Amino acid sequence: MKIICIGRNYSEHIKELNNETPDEPVIFIKPDSALLRNNAPFFIPDFSNDIHHEVELVIKINKLGKHIPVEFAKDYYTEIGLGIDFTARDVQSKLKEKGLPWEKAKGFDHSAVISKFIPIQNYNLSDLNFSLTKNDTLVQEGNTKQMIHNIDEIIAHVSQYFTLKIGDYIFTGTPAGVGNVNTNDHLVGKIEDEVMFDFRVK
């Protein structure tokens, strides 16, 4: 199982971090040790003073595939979930300044929150709302209409480089509103009106 993440897939998020809009999906990978499931608490690591939340829709792959045409990408998933790509922003900034890879800032233990998964047939994936609240305050909200590369385009692109296997997760990018988390913060993520995860920061 692997965790594939897409960066810079929402225009407003690109603007808030002063990044350039990519011509194709930006891909990075987290190890399986990054997973955090079942509403377990997230513990802020000692090596960072600026951990940011990035809420994202997550696709779970249910079929082996390689070089998938975009028109067939829909055959490779039946469920959708919600996740948080926790990012050590201070670590990432230092690494980027030196032109170094920034896996340490993205792939550290428990940096990939995964919610429960729900069947896609009840939802319109081309017009789907999702959100994150921190301490009862809305901090991020997005809609799949805002994606630069939609879900099927992401699957098709990723599969040109990596064989997709059953149980792989794809984080599809975060909307604007990313920000830091602190001890005792309460994070709740929703798809439409359904609570997908509900946990605390320690």
Image (spheres, helix red, strand yellow):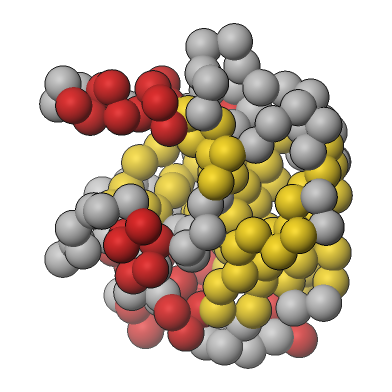
Quadrant where the C terminus is found in the figure: top right
Horizontal arrangement in the rendering, residue 70 relative to residue 187 (left or right): left
Horizontal arrangement in the rendering, residue 197 relative to residue 54 (left or right): right
The residue sitting at 26% across, 23% down in the picture is 95
Horizontal arrangement in the rendering, residue 49 relative to residue 82 (left or right): left
The answer to whether residue 60 shows anywhere in this view is no
**Closest to the observer: 136 or 73?**
136
The residue sitting at 43% across, 32% down in the picture is 89
Q: Position of residue 180 (x, y in %)?
A: 58, 39
Q: Position of residue 2 (x, y in %)?
A: 51, 38
The residue sitting at 71% across, 64% down in the picture is 138
Taking the view exactly as shown, the residue that stands out farthest to the top is 46
The image shows residue 159, relative to residue 41, as above or below, that is below
Quadrant where the N terminus is found in the figure: top right
**Closest to the observer: 196 or 199?**
199
Horizontal arrangement in the rendering, residue 202 relative to residue 101 (left or right): right
The image shows residue 130, relative to residue 19, as above or below, that is below
The answer to whether residue 199 shows anywhere in this view is yes
Callout count: 0
**Closest to the observer: 196 or 19?**
19
The residue sitting at 82% across, 44% down in the picture is 186
The image shows residue 145, relative to residue 57, as above or below, that is below
Q: Position of residue 201 (x, y in %)?
A: 77, 32
